[in-house]
Image (cartoon, rainbow, N blue to C red):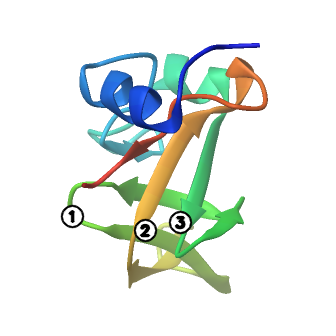
Amino acid sequence: MSDETPETKETSAKSGADVPPDHLAVHPASPHFDAEVLQRGVGIRFKGKARTDIEEYSISEGWVRVQAGKTVDRKGRPLTLKLTGPVEAWFEDLGDDPPVAKKD
């Protein structure tokens, strides 16, 4: 167990603790792709609900991209929808109570 309070965890997240990057994508062609970060497992909470279907996110800009059904573009990549709202991210390999990266 940790002696950190929720305020301490938020402060440590702001100071660069072990939190995911502000912007991350799952497609290797994206400039925001990072295989090492994705290998650790990143949990995403969008508008208060944990989501597993996120293709890309930006915490500071407050949006996520999700696949639009089974529709693909002419290059075979999935079409995505950009949804706006509060986004929170954390590393899933840090246990039940990890530091969370979120916009203030």
In this rendering, the label closer to the viewer, 2 or 3: 2
Q: Quadrant of the N terminus?
A: top right
From the image, tell me which residue sits under label 3: 77
Amino acid type, residue under disc 1 in the picture: Glu
Against 3, residue 34 (above or below) is below
Residue 55: x percent and y percent? 53, 59
What element does badge 3 sit on?
A: loop
Residue 27: x percent and y percent? 49, 46
User: Would you identify the image quadrant in which residue 72 lies?
Assistant: bottom right
Q: CA separation, marks 1 and 3? A: 24 Å
What element does badge 2 sit on?
A: strand
Of the numbered discs in the image, which one, if any, rests on residue 22? none
Q: Residues within 10 Å of mark 3 (few under 14, many from 20)?
A: few
Against 88, residue 5 (above or below) is above
First-in-chain label (1 vs 3) = 1
Q: Residue at x 32, y 54 (%)?
A: 59
Residue closer to the observer: 99 or 5: 5
In this rendering, the label closer to the viewer, 1 or 3: 1
Against 13, residue 70 (above or below) is below
First-in-chain label (2 vs 3) = 2
Residue 9: x percent and y percent? 46, 28
User: Would you identify the image quadrant in which residue 18 lies?
Assistant: top left
What element does badge 1 sit on?
A: loop
Amino acid type, residue under disc 3 in the picture: Arg
Q: Residues within 10 Å of mark 2 (few under 14, many from 20)?
A: many
From the image, tell me which residue sits under label 1: 61
Q: Is residue 12 left or right of residue 18?
A: left
Residue 76: x percent and y percent? 56, 67
Q: Residue at x 31, y 29 (%)?
A: 11
* Residues marked 1 and 3 touching at CB (< 8 Å): no
From the image, tell me which residue sits under label 2: 64
* Residues marked 2 and 3 touching at CB (< 8 Å): no
